[in-house]
Amino acid sequence: MISVNPVALLAERLRTLDPHSPHSYAAEHYSRVPQSGSWFTPREVIEAMLTSDGPHHEHGPAVVGARLIGSLGYAVAGRLGIAIATTGQAYDVGPDSLMLRLDEDGLVEQIAIRSDRFAVLPDDPLAGIPGVEVVEDLAALVVWAARGAHATLAPLIEQIHTSIRYGTVAMWNQVADSVLGPTTKSPLLTGGSQEAGRAAGQLFLDALVAEGAPIRRRGTVRIAENGPGQQILDPVRGMCCLFYRQGEEKCGSCPLVKS
């Protein structure tokens, strides 16, 4: 029998979404990345992020908190949401599985997965492969994914709150943005439906709430032009990421910018 590593196979698919930045969407299998001291477990990563030299540390605790949870929210839940929305597959981001590599600013640049736990829908080509769990439908898939995501994110958010007193609800709302924005936009890269991608993201957030995440805001969408006669869904964040406080312009998805 041919040995199949579903996490590595999924990483290959997600790397093609942006060939110029292959680590932007993919979660590699940890056995297939160069081993070095630059990788951190979720239990180690907050200390490393807080002691980094990133420019966000010069702008007060709110900016630090927003930048850290924005980076971690996308690393843990946003990338996973993209996998669910574009492939109908999910990997394990639980605290004993996820590994994170930071960039020079102390924000997450790449993630890797140690666990072989993997879930797919019944019609997936990997269904029937030993070790691959087949779940009933998309609702069951997001529940499977949310358990690991919440188990990892809840302690990280509590650590940030304890360290700099940034609000936990605000951070969970930013996690919601880290899911809904990517799940709305990523189907454009595969020719899929933005509406279906966003709906998958909403289901994922519902599952996180069921696990105990106090998500209060989920943002909205605007209709934007994407070439002659083509309109797309342009997500608007529920929470401002505060990046503009670092001297940058407000981004197009900022809730403080009127359409």
Image (cartoon, rainbow, N blue to C red):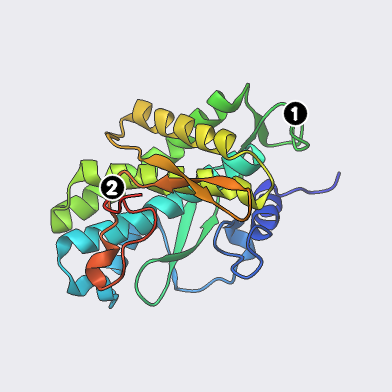
- Residue 22 location in percent, x, y? 61, 65
Q: How many marks?
A: 2
Q: Residue at x 47, y 58 (%)?
A: 99
- Mark 1 Cα shell of 10 Å, populated few (<14), some (14-19), many (≥20): few
Kindly give the residue lying farthest to the top in the view shown.
136
> Tag 2's secondary structure?
loop
Amino acid identity at mark 1: Asp
Q: Residue at x 22, y 54 (%)?
A: 160
Q: Nearer the viewer, residue 65 or 46?
A: 65
- Residue 88 location in percent, x, y? 64, 37
Alpha carbon separation for disc pair 1 and 2: 37 Å
> Which mark is in front, 1 or 2?
2
Q: Is residue 177 left or right of residue 128?
A: left
Residue 105 occupies quadrant = bottom left
Residue 244 occupies quadrant = bottom left
* Residue matched to label 2: 239
Query: Would residue 19 be seen by someone viewing this image from the given angle?
Result: yes
Q: Nearer the viewer, residue 11 or 16?
A: 16
Residue 54 occupies quadrant = bottom left
Q: Nearer the viewer, residue 121 or 3?
A: 121
Query: Would residue 94 be seen by someone viewing this image from the given angle?
Result: no
> Tag 1's secondary structure?
loop
| Labels 1 and 2 touching (C-beta < 8 A) | no
* Residue matched to label 1: 123
Amino acid identity at mark 2: Met
- Residue 8 location in percent, x, y? 67, 54
Q: Quadrant of the N terminus?
A: top right
- Mark 2 Cα shell of 10 Å, populated few (<14), some (14-19), many (≥20): many
- Residue 255 location in percent, x, y? 30, 49
Q: Answer above or below: position of 50 versus 104.
A: above
Q: Nearer the viewer, residue 180 or 168?
A: 180
